[in-house]
Structures are given as C-alpha cells and as structure tokens.
Amino acid sequence: MPTRIASMTKKISANGQALHRAMMSRMEQGGADKEPSEAEAALIEERRLLKEERDKRKAQALLPRPSALDRLVRTHHPQAKDKPKATKEAKGDHETKKPKARKTRSEKHAEKAAALEAARRSPKKPAK
C-alpha cells in the first residue's frame, strides 16, 4: 500500500530523530572516529528512500492533470449489443399484433367539449 503524502513528512521527521539518537549514542560510546552501526546505516538508507519518494511525488503533482472537459469526453458509453437475427421460419409462426388505436389529445378535448355542449342543450328535468 502506498504511503500517504501527508504522513511522509512525519516519517522523515521520526526517522531523523531516530538517526540523531543513534548518532549521539555512537558519539558517547566511542567517539566520532568510529564507523556508523548497522542500525544507523539502515536509518540513513531509509531516510534517503523517504526523501526520494517525497521528491518523486512532488514532481508528479506538478504534472498537468486532465481537465473536467477531457474526463467528460473520455467517458465510456457502452455500445448496444447486436440482436440475434431471427430466422424466416420463426417469423411466419405468429403474427405481430398492431398497437391499439389511441385517441390523440385534440380528439379527447373535442369529445369532452361535445359532451358538455350536449349536456347544456338538453332540456332540464323538473325537480320533484
């Protein structure tokens, strides 16, 4: 799993503190002339790798990123699958039903207006 960039500075700082402690303990024990210990050498190598990773990520962050328009243009829209072709024998077996005739909006309004007109013209029944 990649290391988070936000924690990179903390890791470098913690490594530096550990390296400093190792160097100070070496100074107390044998002086500055003594070679670094294996633990100190490992800390120096880890610090170098952490700094390289930080620089690599910083360089990558400066590269141009795709704009929103580029991402919009490149979106994948699935293509429709080809339907299997029906054989001619299967078509003759059953007939297709035609859709039921439906009234248009204007026909419905005309019918309603005619019903209202007929109701208005009809003689009213006397109330009992």
Image: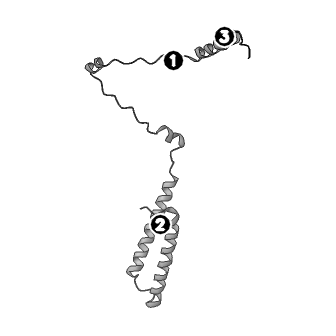
Image quadrant where residue 36 sits: bottom left
Q: Tell us which disc is closer to us: 1 or 2.
A: 1
Q: Earlier in the sequence, mark 3 or mark 1?
A: 1
**Taking 35 as reference, is 55 left or right?**
right
Image quadrant where residue 90 sits: top left
Q: Nearer the viewer, residue 123 or 10?
A: 123
Quickly name the residue at label 3: 118
Give the quarter of the figure containing the N terminus. bottom left
* Labels 2 & 3 near each other (Cβ < 8 A): no
Quickly name the residue at label 1: 102
**Taking 54 as reference, is 95 left or right?**
left
Q: Could you tell me how far apart the alpha carbons at marks 3 and 1 are, in whole angstroms?
A: 24 Å
Residue 46 % position (x, y): 42, 71
Q: Earlier in the sequence, mark 1 or mark 2?
A: 2
Residue 55 % position (x, y): 48, 61
Residue at point 49% right, 56% down? Answer: 59
